[in-house]
Image (cartoon, rainbow, N blue to C red):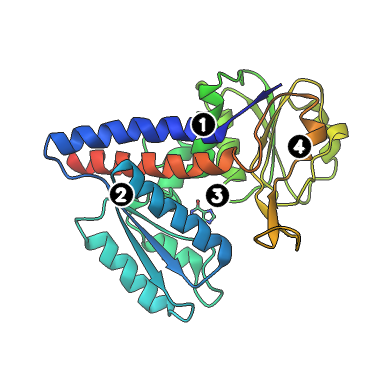
Amino acid sequence: MEILDGKKISNQIKEEITVEVAQMKERGEKVPHLAAVLVGNDGASLTYVGSKVRSCKKIGFESTLIHLPEETTEEDLLKQVHQLNNDPAIDGYIVQLPLPKHIDEEKVLMAVDPDKDVDGFHPTNFGKMALDMETFISATPFGIMELLKRYNVDTEGKHTVVIGRSHIVGRPISILMSQKGKPGNSTVTLAHSRTQNLKELTLQADIVISALGVPRFLKADMVKEGVTIIDVGITRVADDTKEKGYYITGDVDFDNVSKKASFITPVPGGVGPMTIAMLLKNTLLARERHNN
Ligand code: GUN
């Protein structure tokens, strides 16, 4: 069994980007600038955005955090989005999800300039991804593909079962895994909450990608020997004995499933850190594209 070490690989990617940014600086070029818009005070979102901004600083990017109050109106958020679209200093930006309930998420994501949409959430970018055109691939599916690539996991002709059909993870990773390429060329089944015979499907899978958000859902009796497991779940489970009052767990019963797996991602330290690295990669790509 080999651990797919997202922390290690994400550090490698960040080091590679750091070198490129240093070279940009030496040539007297503008360095990439990422902005993040956060509305409200959701605990997990604050952690993620904080981590994204800190990573920018570490690798030599410029970064701007725009933290707006929970009561921000949709109109004001849209104004902020237009301002970022029109600000030549900003190469790429993200609007952290989820947004407060009174704001129409779709409307906001549609307003983001696709050329600055480093999250890859705009329909133009999602469509380009589905058509295998140059675009911004969303950080989580992009990170999973990069992790499989760097560990040389053989996906060619294999059966991949994706659990979860979200727009940010399940749907796009099911498309990417089926596309031509390495990794890719996989036969994909996209399972979700209405799937009736999930265990039958996962037992046939060479690769299981779980993006469900249900702690320890995937048990050892649901997978075959030699399976590759990608655990995208990150759930906070309340626990008074922990310093923070919670612990983080994935969708997979790691202790038991790992005994049958050939490759497996841990939680934390698997897909999570890859997501941040790929957002930075997309921001670097945005800078390079704006140059050309
Ligand atoms: N919320 C959970 N994941 C993400 C992400 O990748 N990007 C944004 N903007 N919000 C998120």
Picture quadrant where residue 81 is located:
bottom left
Q: Say what secondary structure mark 3 lies in.
A: loop
3D distance between C-alphas at marks 1 and 2: 30 Å
Of residues 278 and 54, the one nearer the viewer is: 54
Q: Name the residue under label 2.
A: 115
Q: Mark 4 points at which residue?
A: 254
Of residues 269 and 214, the one nearer the viewer is: 269
Res. 201 visible in picture: no
Res. 229 visible in picture: yes
Residue at x 39% of width, y 42% of height? 136
Picture quadrant where residue 163 is located:
top right
**Placement of 68 over or under 226, stated as above or below:** below
Residue at x 76% of width, y 51% of height? 193
Q: Earlier in the sequence, mark 1 or mark 4?
A: 1
3D distance between C-alphas at marks 3 and 2: 18 Å
Q: What residue type is labelled 4?
A: Phe
Q: Residues within 10 Å of mark 2 (few under 14, many from 20)?
A: many
